[in-house]
Structure formats: C-alpha cells, structure tokens
Amino acid sequence: MSDFRTMLAGFPYFNISENFFPNLRLQDGHNWAEEFIQNVVIPRLPEAVASHFPVEIGTVLVMFACAGVFVGVVPLLPLVLVLAERKVSARFQNRTGPMRVGPWGILQTLADGVKLIFKEDFIPPQGDKLLFLLAPYIIFACSFAVFAAIPFSEGILVSDFNIGIFYIMAISSVIVMGVIMAGWSSNSKWSLLGSLRSAAQIVSYEIPLGLSILTVVMLVESLSMQEIVASQSNGVFSWLIFRTPFAFIAFFIFFISSIAEVNRTPFDLPEAESEIVAGFHTEYSGMRFALFFIAEYANMFAVSAIAVTLFLGVWEGVLPGYDILGGFPGFVIKSMGLVFLMMWLRWTLPRLRVDQLMNLCWKYFIPIAFFNILGTGIWGLIFPEDTVISTSISCAIIYIGLIAAYKVAGRGIAQRPAPQPS
C-alpha cells in the first residue's frame, strides 16, 4: 500500500495521506513463498550460492511452481466430475452409464478428452477471430484464479488475502465477460442470445449471492478467509450456518444463486439446447470447446468449496478436538457433497423460463437477502457474543422453521388437484 501511495503522489490532483487508507492491506506482512525460500531452500544451497541468491526471484519461481501445480491438478476435476455426473444421471434413469472404456467405464472421460484434442479447431470465417480465441482462455483463467484464495486445509492456502472473499467475488465476476466475448465473436444469433442471457442471469444473481456473503462478513467482522476459518473452529455448532437463523437462510440463497452463476439446471438458460442449440459456445469445437466444460466443472467445485468455507466449517471437524470430517479429506467430502446435490437437482428439476428465473431473483431472493442483513444486525445487538444460549436459540428457531416449511409444502402438495383422465 505504501507503493500505491508513492505512485499516486506523483499526480498533481492526488494528495495521499497516511490516513487515507486506514487498515487496508491486500495481504498480511508475511509471505509463505518468501519464508519457504529463506527457511527451506537457501539453507540447503552451497554457501557461495546462498549468499548471492536473490530471495525475490526465488519467491516468484515458487509462486510460478505453485500455479503450475494448480493448472496441472485442477483440470483433473472435470475428468472425475463428468464421469460422476454420467453415473449419477444413469442411476436416476435406471441405466448403467458408460461401461466400455476401462473398468466400469472410468476411462471414458479421458477418451473423450483425447478425441477433443484431435478434433478440427473451427473458427467462424465472419466472426471476430481475436475475441473468439481469447474468450475460452479468459473463462478458464478466471475459474482457476478463484482457487488461490480458497483454504483447502490448515497448510494449503496459496494466498491469505485480507480481502479474500472480496477477491473471489471480483475475479469470478470477470467470467461473464468471456461468455459475452464468445457469443459476440461467433457471428451467430444463437451464440449471441446465449451470451446475453448469461449476462442478465449472472449479473442478476450476483446480487443475492453477494448479500448472502455480507451476512457472513457481518458475523465474522472480516473479509479474510483465515478469519472465517478461525470463527468456526469449535465443532459443528460453531459453523456459521447454525450461528443464526439468518445465516441458515443465507446459505440456501447462496447455494441456489451459485447454481445460477455456473449455469446449471434448472438455471441453464444460457445453454438451453431446446431453443438456442448450445448457447454461447455453439460455434466452438475441439479443445476450445473442452475449455468451457473444464471451467464449468471447476466452477462447480469452486462455488461448493466457497459455500463450505463460509457456512459449513471449512476443514474443521464436526467435534472439537476430534478429526471427524476434518482436514483436507473432510473439506473435499463436504465440497463433493454439494457438487452431488447440484447433479441431483440437474436430473430432477425441469428448466425454468426466463421470466421465472428473473422473478425468483428480483422478487424473492434479493428482498430475503436484505431481510437477512437486517436480521443479522439485530441478532448481533441482542447477542453480541456467541454463547451456548444464543446457539441453542438459533438451532431451535431453525428446527421450528424447517418443520413449518415442511408442513406448508406438504399441505400445498396435498391440495393439488389430481389429473383427470382424458
């Protein structure tokens, strides 16, 4: 931040004082890559080399190596998730799914990837070639940049930003630009319609999603992901989803809005094959087409991991002092559970219409999200600190609310008229 002040001080219309940016730091003072170079790498080098080894260059090399690991590992997620979705859909439809390539069909998605590598890379002759080529890489890069601020476990966090959750929201919002670029540059009415739908949908659902995150920020009083983790370290009843009944509602708004953000059924209107073929990526083929799918499934895991971080205890265990659903395996199990729920909804619910999609966002989710913020503020005034009494009252209200919602939903289903024979 001092460099930023120095840079702006050279402009005649900027008068930057020390109090202009109070307590605003993009990252904590320590840097894990620099500490790794100083404490691990340099002591193992020969004395003649260690005395002249530039720490800054070593830090950059470590960060590049870490980015390379993510770029190499995260694309493996779609190989697993695509196969899982095929098996889940087959189970729901009383089929076996892919069974031919490899034992139980586990190599089917790998074979599909090899096929896409050798397919023709088609570019529309009348389209904008530069934007057409850049669009999948922008979506791909932004999808992977989100993982830099997600705390996978106590020792697996690439960058501990003070504004970690704000960074995640900001970088994930850039994805819509790649979608619009893909639709515009394809010179196709179907692609353009799909990209415009995506812009309207993603921008709309970012509002309730951000307001739901604001509920968590009010409870933790920090934007740091590490602070959010530390606030949920005392077992399942310290998880933010049970901290207040408003956080419980915020979790469902966040999860449903995140499904709309990643264009999954029943919110997959940007890719509605019934009227606009494949949407914004209709004209793409080969590996450029595969990049969209890699980004989609990476986004599915990313939003599930963010939901686990914000509401479901991150990598902390269910019981304090016991490693039950704790650590990196526990974090992955929780995240994959939410991914499975997304797949379950895809093969269960029909697609919404455009007006239903927007009504759900603007008429229901946004007012409820504002109500959650107001309720969280009032709850904080009544219970300034988390105690056994406040947690017990919160869990009791959540239980009563679930029973009431079940009764209302059951009464609505019972009163539905039975279909008459023709």
Image (cartoon, rainbow, N blue to C red):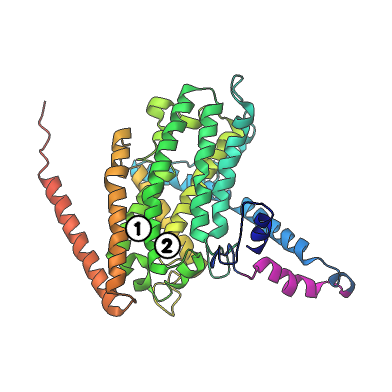
Q: Is residue 351 left or right of residue 122?
A: left
Residue 310's disc is: 2
User: Badge 1 local density, few (<14 within 10 Å), some, or many (20+)?
Assistant: many
Pick the front one: 386 or 370:
370
Task: Based on the picture, tell me whether residue 330 belongs to the magenta stretch.
Answer: no
Q: Is residue 372 above or below residue 299?
A: below
Give coordinates of residue 81: x percent, y percent: 48, 48
Give coordinates of residue 215: x percent, y percent: 36, 61
The part of the image, by quadrant, that contains residue 70 is bottom right
Amino acid at pointer 1: Phe
Question: At 68% across and 66% down in the image, what residue appears?
Answer: 33
- Residue 85 in view here: yes
Q: Is residue 41 left or right of residue 212?
A: right
Give the labeled residue for mark 1. 251
Question: At 73% across and 75% down in the image, what residue appears?
Answer: 39
Q: Is residue 407 left or right of residue 241?
A: left
Q: Specify the segment rendered in magenta.
A: 29-47
Pick the front one: 213 or 293:
213
Pick the front one: 178 or 348:
178
Question: At 12% across and 41% down in the image, what residue appears?
Answer: 416
Amino acid at pointer 2: Leu
The part of the image, by quadrant, that contains residue 43 is bottom right
Earlier sequence position, callout 2 versus callout 1: 1
Give coordinates of residue 267: x percent, y percent: 37, 40
Q: Are marks 2 and 1 in contact (CB under 8 Å)?
A: yes
